[in-house]
């Protein structure tokens, strides 16, 4: 889920930014500090979008750069348990697929790709034995988040499934609708 979050922090403005307007200098430093930052509490910080109130600069002895207490807003992506997400298959492996959900990837274990016995081919395609369904790189899919781990903040782990109703490759989701339409046409 994407969030607009307001934060407050002390931001250091180094001497090379002294000639710039203070708001511009602080925005540059905020973007450098926060964009791409990952934490359990915030998720993945996408962008710093607004600089709010800026307090008076304070110089710490032994450091020539002033610090400004600043309020600001960020856009962040924080995955939530049971959240349904859309994404694109970024890569395949014999153990599953990696679903790109925007700023972060989720892993779909092979057993969670479809309700079928699944085999992996050399050309990186997962295929269902009975259904004939296949999953490959660049397929657009809908999945549900089933596991979130921020044990390693630099590399969070997100587990997703596509085995529940309403989930899976978008083409698979259209199939029941096509069957209903054909059945209605036959009755007419």
Image (cartoon, grey):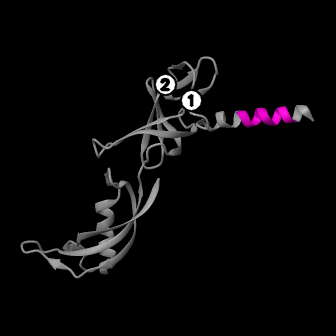
Q: CA distance from mark 2 to mark 1?
A: 13 Å
Within the magenta stretch, is there residue 188? no
Identify the residue shown where x is 74% and y is 37%.
Answer: 177
Earlier-in-chain disc, 2 versus 1: 2
- The structure residue drawn at horizontal position 23% and vertical position 78%, both measured from the top left corner, is 18
From the image, tell me which residue sits under label 1. Answer: 135
Q: Residue 108, percent across and down? A: 46, 32
Residue 93 vs residue 86: left or right?
left
**Element type at mark 2:** helix
**Residue 57 image position (x, y, % from top left):** 20, 80
The local crowd at label 1, few if under 14, some if 14 to 19, many if 20 or more residues have their Cα within 10 Å, is many
Residue 9 in which image quadrant: bottom left
Q: Is residue 51 above or below residue 45?
A: below
What residue sits 33% from the left and 64% below the top? 31
Against 122, residue 88 (above or below) is below
Q: Main secondary structure of the magenta part?
A: helix
106 or 145: which is nearer to us?
A: 145
| Snapshot quadrant of residue 47 | bottom left
Indicate the secondary structure of the residue bearing disc 1. strand
Residue under circle 2? 111
Decide: few, some or many residues near mark 2? Use Cα within 10 Å; few <14, some 14-19, many ≥20: some
Residue 180 colored in magenta in the image: yes
**Left of 19 or right of it: where is 86?**
right
- Which residues fall within the magenta stretch? 176-184
Work out which quarter of the rendered image holds the C terminus and state it.
top right
């Amino acid at each position: 889920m994407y969030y607009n979050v307001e934060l407050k922090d002390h931001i250091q403005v180094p001497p090379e930014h002294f000639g710039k307007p203070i708001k511009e200098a602080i925005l540059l430093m905020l973007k450098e500090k926060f964009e791409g930052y990952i934490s359990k509490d915030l998720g993945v910080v996408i962008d710093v979008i607004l600089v709010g109130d800026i307090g008076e600069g304070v110089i710490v002895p032994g450091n020539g750069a002033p610090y400004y207490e600043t309020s600001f807003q960020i856009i962040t992506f924080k995955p939530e348990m049971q959240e349904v997400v859309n994404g694109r298959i970024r890569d395949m492996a014999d153990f599953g697929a990696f679903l790109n959900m925007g700023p972060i990837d989720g892993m779909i274990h092979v057993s969670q790709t479809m309700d079928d016995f699944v085999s992996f081919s050399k050309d990186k395609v997962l295929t269902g034995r009975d259904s004939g369904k296949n999953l490959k790189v660049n397929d657009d899919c809908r999945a549900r988040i089933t596991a979130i781990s921020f044990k390693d903040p630099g590399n969070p782990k997100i587990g997703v499934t596509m085995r529940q109703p309403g989930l899976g490759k978008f083409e698979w989701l259209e199939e029941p609708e096509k069957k209903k339409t054909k059945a209605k046409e036959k009755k007419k």
